[in-house]
Amino acid sequence: MMMGKPKIILKSVTKYYDAYTCALSNIDLTISEGEWVSIIGPSGSGKTTLLNMMSGLDTPTSGTININGTDLTGLGQKMLAKFRRENVGLIFQQHHLIPYLDALENVMTAQYFHGKVDREIAREALERMGLGQRLKHRPAQLSGGEQQRVCIARALINDPEIILADEPTGNLDMKNGEIVMGIIKQLVDEGRTLVIVTHNMDIAKQGRRTIQLVDGKISTDSSRQTHNPLETSVGRKANSPPTSTGSARR
Ligand SMILES: Nc1ncnc2c1ncn2[C@@H]1O[C@H](COP(=O)(O)OP(=O)(O)OP(=O)(O)O)[C@@H](O)[C@H]1O
Ligand SMILES: [Mg+2]
């Protein structure tokens, strides 16, 4: 497969939350432009931590992280926030919408922090998500699926090259999950780079590359082996223990 230039480069990334909690252990990982990478693994294996490293929402204890040409090492909170605004779209499982703002205002907030507010563009973004009739609704007046779509509109409003999604359909029913995945799929088709954490194997399978984390380590990376891990160790329950395929590589 033709690969674009490296967009996400993690070298020896280790994260300790405290002396006893090693969430990530010596992660080496390169993700290229236009890739769809699915991150799977049991609860507590470090998936969210890994995503937070890529967005600069959290910093590693050691190791280096380069995203879209920016070395995040040593950047302060202000610079990290600026980096995020300019480079990544974050889609969380918990949507983090501002409760007292309506849908339109929530999307415009992201524009504001990016430096250019345009009500028309924000409105169009929500219309694309099928929310043209919900512009003036506050989060509490929206269904879970609608809230998630507002979140996606907000994440994408500044046209990020990299999309980081943490179980974006985890709270959604099947229909809304399909709508959200349809939108995400289109973004990858348009050339964005996607890293998506998911417990849903049908979603993971849509990407070419699947990485399984176990205990803060990469236990399988489908790009490093000839067979697809989805058909072996991860084909069963997400929280089943790593199998022999898990320790075979690296
Ligand atoms: N802020 C924190 N302080 C201390 N420990 C943390 C913190 N955040 C996460 N951890 C720990 O780090 C480990 C990895 O957590 P993480 O949230 O990355 O897991 P996950 O793979 O995303 O799990 P899930 O599938 O349940 O979302 C867990 O053992 C967790 O308890
Ligand atoms: Mg998580």
Image (cartoon, rainbow, N blue to C red):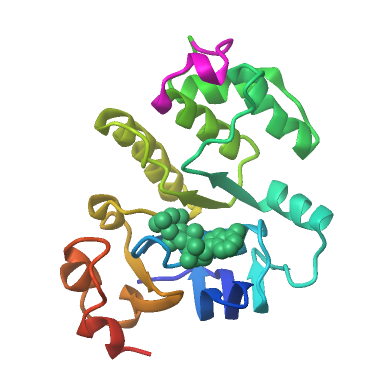
Could you say where residue 49 lies in the image, as x and y percent from the top left?
54, 63
Identify the image quadrant of the C terminus: bottom left
* Front residue of 158 and 64: 64
Is residue 210 among the parts visible in the rendering? Answer: yes
Q: Which residues are magenta?
A: 134-145
Please tell me in which quadrant of the rendered image residue 240 appears.
bottom left
> Does the magenta run of residues contain 142?
yes
Q: Is residue 44 left or right of residue 65?
A: left
Could you say where residue 209 lies in the image, as x and y percent from the top left?
34, 66
Is residue 34 among the parts visible in the rendering? Answer: no
Q: Is residue 88 above or below residue 158?
A: below
Please tell me in which quadrant of the rendered image residue 213 appears.
bottom left
* Front residue of 64 and 142: 142
> Does the magenta run of residues contain 174?
no
Q: Is residue 225 above or below residue 241?
A: below
Q: Which residue extends farthest front?
A: 20
Could you say where residue 69 lies in the image, as x and y percent from the top left?
69, 67
Q: Is residue 214 left or right of residue 98?
A: left
Could you say where residue 61 lies in the image, as x and y percent from the top left?
67, 76
Q: Is residue 106 above or below residue 40?
A: above
Q: Residue at x 76, y 39 (%)?
A: 114
Q: Residue at x 49, y 69 (%)?
A: 31
